[in-house]
Image (cartoon, grey):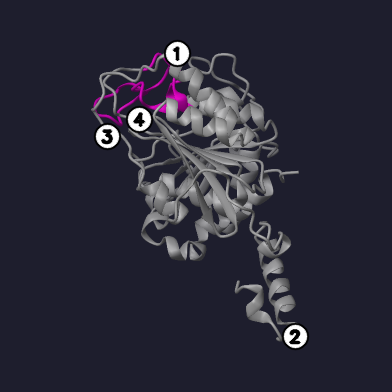
Amino acid sequence: MPPRSAFAGRGRLPVLLCTALCLAAAAAAVEPACAQSSAIAPPPPLTVVKRPLVAFITSRKHLAADTLDDFVTRAARKARFQALVEALADQDWPQVTAIADQIGYRAVTVREGRVWYAIVFDRRGRDPIVILNLKPRRELIIGAPHVGFERAIGEQATVLMRDVGARAVILNGADRCASAAHTACDGTTAVCGASEPYRDSDVGHNVDTLFHIAHVVLAARWPNAIVMSIHGMDEDDEGVKTQMIVSNGATAKDDDKLTAATRLRAMIGRAIPPKGTVVSCNLTADEKYQARNLCGTTNVQGRHVNGDADACTGGVSQGTGRFIHLEQDREVRDPYLDDLPNIAAHPFHNALVSALGKVAPKVP
C-alpha cells in the first residue's frame, strides 16, 4: 500500500482501498495490514539485515550429507542453546546477543513488510535456525527438519510464517544424512542409501538435538499453539495422484474431525480437487485412496507434543490434537523457490494459508 502521504487530498480513496483490503484478507482468514497500527515498530537491538526474509533464510549454510562422524552435542552446549531460545522467546535481546556469541551463533533481525523477525543461526550450519515473529497473529509453530534434503521446504516454512502470522519457525542446520551414526530412536528409512535406522543428524527422529530442544522450549512457552512439521515426498505415480498427506501423528482415526490436522485436511480438500489429492492418515474415508504410509507417527516432535512420555521409542494412539504432520510433493513445494514473487497465485499456498488461519488459534 502506498504511504499515507501519497493519498493526501484524494478524499475517500484510502478508506475505500483499506476496506477492500480488509474484506479480501478476511476471506483468506488472515489479519489485514489496515487492521494493524499504521506505525512500523522499531527493530529489536540486533544487527539489521537489509535483505528479503526468504532470501536471507535460503542463503544460510547447511552442512552437507556424509560430513560428520556423529551428531553428538555436549551437555554444556545444549544448556546454553536452551537459554538462547528462552531468551529469544522472552525478547531479552542483550541475553540473546551474549549467548549467541558464546556458542557460535549470530542473532540478526529482518523486516518483511510491516513486521520484524528475529533470527538466530549457527555460523557453521550444523545446528538449527530459529525465527521469531515479533508481531504474530496465529498460535502456530512451524518446524522443517529436512531443509536441504527436501527441496523448498525451508522457504515454504518461512513464507507460511509470514503469510499466516505464525509465532516461530525452526529449521534444521545439518542435512538429515550428514552424520554416519544412527539415532537410538525407533524407525528405519532408506533416504540416505540402504535401509537403516535414522541417522542421528535426522532431527525429526532424534530427541538428543538442539532442534528438539528448540521445539520443546517453544511448545511449552505457547501451550495453545499448533505445532506443524512440514515435509517433502516423492510424486505419487499410482492411482489417484495424492499430493498432500496430513496426519495428527497419532494412530487412531479422527472421523469426527476433532484434531487440527483432520480439520486442516478437510478445508484444503474442499479447495483442491479432485478427491484424493489431499488425504488424511486419520480419516477412514480416505483409506480408499491407498496413500503411502507417511503419517509422522515416529516424528519425535509430534510424539512429544502429543503427550508421549518417551518421544524416542514410544508412540501415541489419541494424542493431544496439537500436532500436524504434512507431506507434500514437488508441485506443492517448488513454487516457494521457483515462483516466489507470484506465490499468492498458487492454489495450494492459498489453501494452506486460509486453512491454517482457521485451524490455529488467534494470538491474544
**In the picture shown, does residue 20 fall above or below 359?**
below
The image shows residue 245 at horizontal and vertical percentages of 49, 42
Q: Earlier in the sequence, mark 3 or mark 4?
A: 3
Around disc 3, counting alpha carbons within 10 Å, would you say few (fewer than 14), some (14 to 19), or many (20 or more)? some
Q: Earlier in the sequence, mark 2 or mark 4?
A: 2
Q: Earlier in the sequence, mark 1 or mark 3?
A: 3
Q: Amino acid at mark 4?
A: Arg
- The image quarter containing residue 8 is bottom right
Secondary-structure class at tag 4: loop
Q: Circle 2 sits on which residue? A: 11
Which one is closest to the eye, mark 1 or mark 3? 1
**In the picture shown, does residue 100 fall above or below 160?**
above
Q: Circle 3 sits on which residue? A: 64
Residue 206 colored magenta? yes
Residue 340 visible: yes
Q: Circle 1 sits on which residue? A: 75
Q: Are marks 1 and 4 in contact (CB under 8 Å)?
A: no
Q: Circle 4 sits on which residue? A: 126
